[in-house]
Image (cartoon, rainbow, N blue to C red):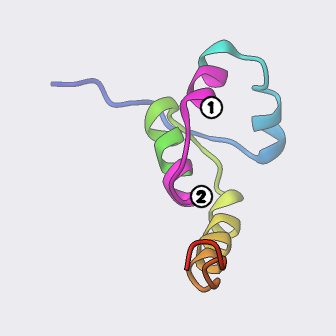
Amino acid sequence: MAEAKRVQKLSLKEFEATKGIPAIEAVLDRMNGGTFMDCHTAFFEATGIWIPELVPVFQRLDAGLTFKDLPAAVR
């Protein structure tokens, strides 16, 4: 049976303290694209770190992206 990943719920302030930790920086450097919540979920799957404060913020940002008009260059 596979070992369950340890979940760490961190505040934004606690997450700031992880800056410079090579394993976390490596995950952040590989992230590219997707919605804000997709990135948050992918980061959690890779590290076991979840930041509850970001959930409502990312949900609102993702909702805002859904309702914006396409730029003229893309239309």
Of the numbered discs in the image, which one, if any, rests on residue 28? 1
In the depicted structure, whether residue 63 falls above or below residue 5: below
Disc 2/disc 1 C-alpha distance (Å): 13 Å
Side (left or right) of 30 relative to 11: left
Q: Is residue 74 above or below residue 53?
A: below
> What residue type is disc 2 on?
Phe
Residue 28 located within the stretch drawn in magenta: yes
Q: How many marks?
A: 2
In the displayed structure image, the side of residue 32 where residue 57 appears, left or right: right
- Would you call the spot at circle 2 few (<14 residues within 10 Å), some (14-19), or many (20 or more)? some
Nearest the eye: 67 or 47: 67
Hey, which residue is sitting farthest top in the picture? 22
Of the pair 38 and 13, the residue shown nearer to us: 38
Q: Which residues are magenta?
A: 24-39
Question: How far across and how far down the image is residue 3, in percent?
Answer: 28, 24
Left of 12 or right of it: where is 71?
left
Marks 2/1 in contact by CB < 8 Å: the verdict is no
Query: 10 Å neighbourhood of mark 1: few (<14), some, or many (≥20)?
Result: some
Between 70 and 41, the one lying in front of the other is 70
Which quadrant of the figure contains the N terminus? top left
The image quadrant of residue 23 is: top right
Q: Quadrant of residue 26?
A: top right
Residue under label 2: 36
Say what secondary structure mark 1 lies in: helix
Give x and y (percent) for residue 50.
58, 45
Up-down relation of residue 53 to residue 72 (above or below): above
Does the magenta-highlighted stretch encompass residue 29?
yes
- State the predominant SS element of the stretch in magenta: helix
Considering the numbered disc 2 on the image, is that residue within a helix, a strand or a loop?
Answer: helix
Residue under the point 55% across and 37% down? 31
Residue at horizontal 48 percent and vertical 49 percent from the top: 41
Residue drawn where x is 55% and y is 29% of the image: 30
